[in-house]
Structure formats: C-alpha cells, structure tokens
Image (spheres, rainbow, N blue to C red):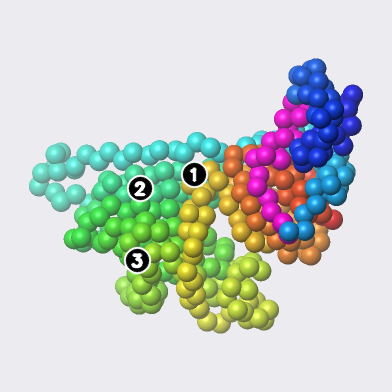
Amino acid sequence: MSEIDENIIIKFLSGLATAEESREILRWKNSSLENTKTFKEIELAFNASEIVMNREKFDASKAFPKFKLRLRKSRVVSFRRSKLRQFVGYAATAIIAIGLTWFSQKSFHPEEEPAETYQSVETPSGAKSLITLVDGTKIWLNAESKLTYPSRFVDSKRVVTLEGEGYFEVAKDKYRPFEVKTSNLSIQVLGTVFNLKSYPEEGVIETTLLEGSVALSKIVNEKKEQEIYQLQPNQQATFIKKKGFLTEDQVIAANLSASEASERSSEKLIVNSVIDVDRIAAWKDGDMVFKNETFESLAIKLERRYNAKIIFEDEVLRGYRFSGKFDEISIEQALRALQFTSTFNYKIEQGMITIKK
C-alpha cells in the first residue's frame, strides 16, 4: 500500500477516524483504481461479516493496531497469489434447479407395469442444488451431499435416501407418507419442512423441524425399523452414532467424557428446543450463521463451502469460539473477519490452509 498509512483505513472502518483522516481516506481511495480495489478488499471483509466474540470486552481502539499487523501478514500468503485460487474464491451462489419430467412407460408398452427407476444428484464442495421431485417436494442439497430418489413414486411410501445435508419442503399426501433414509435413521412425514444433516464421516445425524411433525426411526436392518421419537416444531434431534468423528461442541452437547467420545459402544438420542431454527437452514440461502461455535466446527463448514482443506497447527486454536454471519464473501475475507476478534494467523502451503498462532 502506498501514500497512506494502513492504520488510518482500519481506524476509518472502526469508526475512530477524525474528520480530517476521513477526508484523507476518500482522497486516497479515489486517486487510483488500485487504491479503490485495496480499500474495497478490506471493507468487504469488515462489513460483509458480523463477527462477535466477547462483545462486552471489545475495544476498537485496541483492536485496529492488531488487525493492521494481521492484515499485513496475511498478504504474504494472499489467496490471490496462491495456487488455491481455483477453489477458494467466492462460495457458489447459483442454485442448480433440477426439474424432473417423466414419461410413462405405459404409453409405449401398455401391457407392462412401469418399474420404479432411481436417479441420484450429488453436489460437490462449494456448491448446492435444488431438486423438485415429481410429487412437488422441494429439496435443497448442501455441499458434498447426495440424494437418491425414484423417477416416480409407485409404492405406498415416497422414499428417498440422503448422504450429507438437505433442507426438505415435503408436498402433502395423506395416502403416501414421505420417508428419508440415512445411514442409521429413517425420517417419516406426511407434509412438513425440516433440515436433515447426515454426513457419513460425522458421528451425528441432526434433524431440525421447522413445520409439521416427523417420526424418527432407528434402522435395524433392511426390513425392520424401530420408532424412537416424534419431533415437534422448533425441536432438534441429535443422534449420536457409534462411528464417525465428533467435534468438541457435539461432545459437550452429548455430555460425553473423552473416553466415551472415542470409544462409543452405544447409540444416543438427544432432543433440544431450538429458538432460532432459521439459523440451521441459512446455508440454503447462501448464508453461514454460527452461534458460540468452535473454530473446529466452523472450519468444517468453511471446507465444504469453499472446497478447501483446513488444518490447525495448534490444538488450542480449535477451541476458539465465534458467533456471527457470513454471506457471499470469499474465504480470505471470512478468515480476515474472524481475525478481527481473535488472535490467529493462517498460511497456504502445498494446497493446505494452516491456522496458526
């Protein structure tokens, strides 16, 4: 940066700049396209995020010198100059709309009963998709998710299979219940709205109900299911599996000891009331909302959202907690925003984002 002290820009964004300093910022910003671009990069990270950490102790006058230092260091490993540019740009904002058109096999072979054929949709990292089934049910798929479904429903149930995370708006049909199968649970509804997260590598399955009601059943085998709970609106059921990794937040919520978390011999269901259920499904609208969430848990979401790989150099950093919201910003802006309220740095090396002190 030339012609102006970074200190003044950060003071300006923090609301601490004097009138003269504010005028100086505007003169400098408008003097060249390069200056305007530099200012916008910092401003986007500052304004597009709503990061809160120890708000009652936050002192802007002490924060901006620290941020100035972190900002300078982060430029050494800028994403714009790195090989990661291909996958750490802006999160995918386009939703893939998939319309299903079905032509009855009977029109060609009237003597034959049409067989039930299956299709699947997979969303890669950094993307999401919208599928509209033949019955009118709408399903949003989050990154790294897979939905398998029939081209048409010919049985007494409407059954689909999910790996990953999906937001469901189920069309009502009192004669044919809608069922979502995951690795361990089956979720049955008539017509309702809910969010379901069931990534194979994770040790939990989370079902959050927004409207209607759902019945959760444990899948015993291919032919047997055992109902274990009926959710009501604004409730979330967390099913702890025997296998899969658990974040610190999930271990605390399940009230597990360290040994129980690593050597799980039994399954467990936890049901909690959720006041801000909209936060759970904010991802389908392009937002990432987090509340008192560990850096470890947040990093998993960032990896899926931006198709990135994040590792922690120091285990203490995993426990840092943040609350806030990201909209459609780049991962570099997201990391800078988190740096506003916590002391850490990051670097890029051989295709890896390393979080360090």
Residue at horizontal 80 percent and vertical 48 percent from the top: 60
Give the crowd class for mark 1: few <14, some 14-19, many >=20 residues within 10 Å.
some
Residue lying at the far top of the rendered structure: 31
Type of amino acid at the residue the image marks with label 2: Lys
Give the amino acid at mark 1.
Asp
Please state if 19 lies on the left or on the right of 295 as rendered: right
Label 3 crowd (10 A; few <14 / some 14-19 / many >=20): many
In the visual, does 307 lie left or right of 93? Answer: right
Q: Is residue 21 left or right of residue 94?
A: right
Q: Is residue 262 above or below residue 153?
A: below
Q: Residue 176 location, x and y as percent?
A: 22, 60
Residue 8 picture quarter: top right
Q: Secondary structure at mark 2?
A: strand
Q: Quadrant of the C terminus?
A: bottom right
Residue that mark 3 sits on: 214
Q: Which residue is mark 2?
A: 138
Span colored in magenta: 37-55
Q: Say if residue 119 shows up in the picture.
A: no
Q: Is residue 156 left or right of residue 244?
A: left
Q: Please tell me whether the stretch drawn in magenta is mainly helix, strand or loop.
A: helix
Horizontal and vertical percent for residue 12? 79, 35
How much space separates mark 1 and mark 3, taking CA atoms? 23 Å
Q: Secondary structure at mark 3?
A: strand
Residue 52 lies in the magenta-colored region: yes
Viewer-proximal residue among 330 and 289: 289
Amino acid under disc 3: Val
